[in-house]
Every structure is written in structure tokens, then in C-alpha cells.
Amino acid sequence: MMWSPLWLSLRVALFATLLGLATGLPIAYILARKDSPWVDTLGALTNLPLVLPPTVLGYYLLVAFGYNSPLGRFLDRLGIPLVFTWRGAVLAAWMVSMPLIIQSAGAAFAAVDRELEDVARTLGESEWGVFWRVTFPLARPGILAGTLMAFARALGDFGTTLMVAGNIPGRTQTMAIAIYDAVQMGDQQRANALVLVLTLTALAILLLLRRLTHHLPGGPT
């Protein structure tokens, strides 16, 4: 019973982090390199998940993707419903973890020396080549840090995931929800075991983060 929630949590966290990278890195680059009122608004919106209660985020996702919404009905017709499925858990975890990628990657992009990028341009590199050969490698430690923090945050999400995916053992019951369920049922032994496993997993991620950011080029010394 313990390993099913752990496996589901790891799978949800992985997909949520990959989705966060795909959507968060472009936003982080824009926030780091552009300066306008609409960019400020974008930055404020992407930080909302950090300050809003998880139930509010879950409610917004239910309104947007629930069975009564046009988008929810469309996805249901395609055979990929989100509410009360593991995909809904991914959506919830993505929502709460993506700001960590944006903040860390945005700071890393902002710290890249623009003169190095200009040198690459004078040598004939395209903007795409400048990004992948100069900007991204220099920003990589910050991007990696944000990625691992986002994974850890997605791994432990509770409120938003419960609102969107529910508590269905074997289908949507992640580690955090399983802990809540065990406490509610008075199963102290199972709650203790789940808490220990989740804590050790999160600690391992943080230790890995520290080691990688110290050994990657551009990381702290």
C-alpha cells in the first residue's frame, strides 16, 4: 500500500516538472530579458501560485478543466479527462511547482553576461545558437536548481492535487494525500512510514541539488 502512492507521486512529479520546464523556461527568459508593463503583469501572474491558497488554485483548475467547462467537455470527448485522474494530479503539481523553475531560471538568465552573447553574435551565431551555446550553458546551474526544487514541490503537493484529482487509492492517491488519509483513519503506523519515506525522498533531492550545483560549471564554490 505504501509503494503505490510513492510510485504515483514520483510519476506525477516527473511529468509536472517536464511540463514546468517546457512552459517555464520561455517565461523565465522573457521575464529576465524584457522590460515592459505586460512583462511585469506576466511575472505577477506566474508568481500567484506561490501566494494563493492551494484550494483557490484547485478551484481555478476545476473551473477551467472540470466536466462543466467547455475545455473539460472537449478533453473528455477526446478520452483524456483531467479531473479525478492522475493527469489532473500532474496539472495541479505543475501549477504549484512551475513558479520555482521560473524564479530560479529567470535569475540565472539575468545573470548571464550579455557581452559573451554579443561576442557569439559577431562570430556568426544565430540567436538560437547563442541561446543554446552560450546563454543556456551559463544559466544551467540555476535552471537545474529550479528543476529539482520544482520536482520536490510537485512530489509533496497536497491541497491543489486533492481538489483536482481527489483521493482514489491506486489511481490519484499521492504520498501527501495517503498521509492525510492514514491520519484520518487513525492508522498511525502507516502515517509514520509514509512520512518517513517522503521526508527521506525530499532530503535526497535537496542533497543532490547541493552536490550538483557545486560541481557544475558556474555553480557556487
Image (cartoon, rainbow, N blue to C red):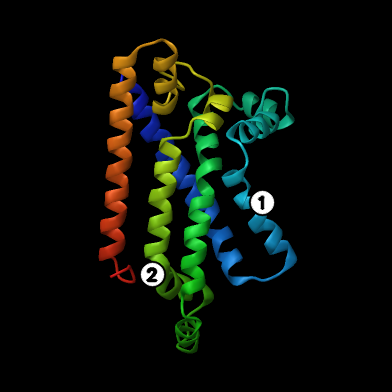
- Residue 44's spot in the image, x, y percent? 66, 55
- Residue 117's spot in the image, x, y percent? 48, 81
| Front residue of this view, candidates 79 and 185 | 185
- Judge whether residue 3 can be spotted in this image: no
Kindly identify the residue that appears in the image at 40 percent across and 40 percent down. Answer: 14
Task: Tell me the residue that label 1 is attached to.
Answer: 45
Q: Is mark 2 on a helix, strand or loop?
A: helix
Say whether residue 6 is left or right of residue 39. Answer: left
- Judge whether residue 69 can be spotted in this image: yes
Kindly identify the residue that appears in the image at 64 percent across and 70 percent down. Answer: 34
Task: Tell me the residue that label 2 is attached to.
Answer: 137
Closer to the observer: label 1 or label 2? 1
How packed mark 2 is, by other alpha carbons closer than 10 Å (few <14, some 14-19, many 20 or more), is some
Above-or-below relation of 212 to 85:
below
Say which amino acid is labelled 2. Pro
Say which amino acid is labelled 1. Leu
Which quarter of the rendering shows the N terminus?
Answer: top left
Above-or-below relation of 15 to 77:
below
Above-or-below relation of 105 to 128:
above
How packed mark 1 is, by other alpha carbons closer than 10 Å (few <14, some 14-19, many 20 or more), is few
Which quarter of the rendering shows the C terminus?
Answer: bottom left
| Front residue of this view, candidates 195 and 72 | 195
